Amino acid sequence: RHYDITPATNAANAQATVTLYFTQQEFDNYNAYPGHGLSLPTGPSDTTGKTNLRVYQFHGFSATSLPGTYSGNAVEINPADGNIIWNAAAQYWEVSFAVDGFSSFFLSSVNGAILPVKLLSFSGTIRDKKRP
């Protein structure tokens, strides 16, 4: 899954906690992809899958929004396993992590392939105007 998140001002230096949302079907599709690397969670109790999950942040500009085409550097983010939460009521995963600067985010696993998906909608709110 691919998210482009850019605040109206100070995108390069903004700090925040970001939460991205994923369905179990998206994780299952990733795990079914040949050569995907280590598997993402296969269900809410899959602690190994949580340990494997990574978010890759790509800075800069890209005309295609594909991994490896951004003008800036890439950062591997390893969310704390406690911040990878299955929301049983809503039937989706919530993956939260702190960021310095905004840009594009891709879900993958340790040494895994990045499978981009177009973002259909996004909403966000400012909380306390600082990082927790």
Image (cartoon, rainbow, N blue to C red):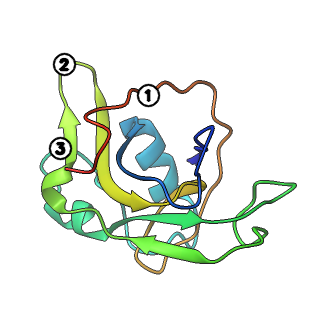
Residue at 31 percent across and 47 percent down: it is 95
> Foreground: 46 or 51?
51
Numbered tag placed on residue 44 in the rendering: 3
Q: Position of residue 90 (x, y in %)?
A: 27, 20
First in sequence, mark 3 or 2: give its number: 3
Q: Residues within 10 Å of mark 1 (few under 14, many from 20)?
A: few
**Which numbered disc, 1 or 2, marks the residue that appears first in the sequence?**
2
Q: Give the residue at x 84% y 54%.
A: 64
Can you identify the residue that label 2 sits on? 89
| Mark whose residue sits in front, 3 or 1 | 1
Q: Position of residue 67 (x, y in %)?
A: 69, 66
Task: Give neighbour class at mark 3: few <14, some 14-19, many 20+ (Cα, 10 Å).
Answer: some
Instruction: Say few, some or many: other residues with alpha carbon within 10 Å of mark 2 (under 14 / 14 to 19 / 20 or more).
Output: few
| Residue placed under numbered mark 1 in the picture | 124
Q: What amino acid type is highlighted by mark number 3?
A: Pro
Left or right of 129 on screen, residue 6: right
Task: Please name which of the two marks, 1 or 2, marks the residue nearer to the observer.
Answer: 1
